[in-house]
Image: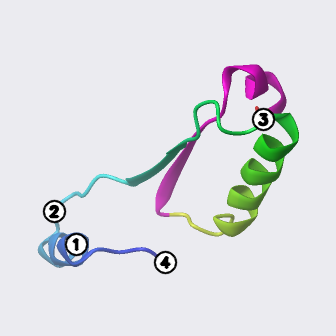
């Protein structure tokens, strides 16, 4: 579970905190197979992270396959 000190303090006070976003952009540094491998690895690693949103930005040529 990922929680920052600020989130924990706000929770204690009953304040609303926004969900954490983890984003990855690998531009043109991966081919299709490498893009798929990386996306699947990230998906497996963060599968049980309910408190975060994950955004992946693969190369343009891999968009439809990584989707």
**Disc 4 and disc 3: Cα gap in Å?**
26 Å
Q: Is residue 62 above or below residue 47?
A: above
The residue under label 1 is 11
Of tags 4 and 3, which is closer to the observer? 3
Label located before the other in sequence (3 or 2): 2
Q: Are marks 1 and 3 in contact (CB under 8 Å)?
A: no
Which is closer to the viewer, label 3 or label 2?
A: 3
Distance in Å between CA atoms under marks 3 and 2:
36 Å
Q: Verify CB contact (< 8 Å) between mark 3 and mark 2.
A: no
Residue at 77% over, 27% down: 62
Q: Total of numbered circles in the picture? A: 4
Assess whether mark 3 and mark 4 are in contact (beta carbons under 8 angstroms).
Answer: no
Sooner in the amino-acid sequence: mark 4 or mark 3: 4
Residue at (76%, 32%) from the top-left corner?
A: 67
The residue segment tinted magenta is 51-65
* Label 2: which secondary element: loop
Q: Residues within 10 Å of mark 1 (few under 14, many from 20)?
A: few
Seen in the picture, residue 47 relative to 13 is either above or below; the reply is above
Q: Measured from the top left, where is residue 63 in percent x and y?
A: 73, 25
Q: Which residue was labeled with disc 4?
A: 1
Q: Nearer the viewer, mark 4 or mark 1?
A: 4
Are discs 2 and 1 less than 8 Å apart at CB? Answer: yes
In the rendered image, the residue lying farthest to the left is 13
- Disc 1/disc 3 C-alpha distance (Å): 35 Å
Q: Is residue 38 magenta?
A: no
Disc 3 target residue = 66
Q: CA distance from mark 2 to mark 1?
A: 6 Å
The answer to whether residue 4 is left or right of residue 50 is left
Location of residue 30 by image quarter: top right
User: Which is more N-terminal, label 4 or label 2?
Assistant: 4
Locate residue 23 relative to residue 26 in the image: left or right.
Answer: left
- Discs 1/3, front: 3
């Amino acid at each position: 579970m990922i929680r920052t000190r600020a989130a924990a303090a706000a929770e204690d006070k009953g304040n609303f905190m926004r969900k954490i976003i983890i984003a990855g952009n690998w531009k043109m540094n991966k081919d299709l197979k490498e893009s798929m491998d990386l996306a699947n690895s990230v998906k497996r690693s963060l599968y049980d992270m309910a408190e975060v949103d994950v955004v992946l930005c693969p190369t343009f040529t891999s968009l439809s396959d990584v989707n």
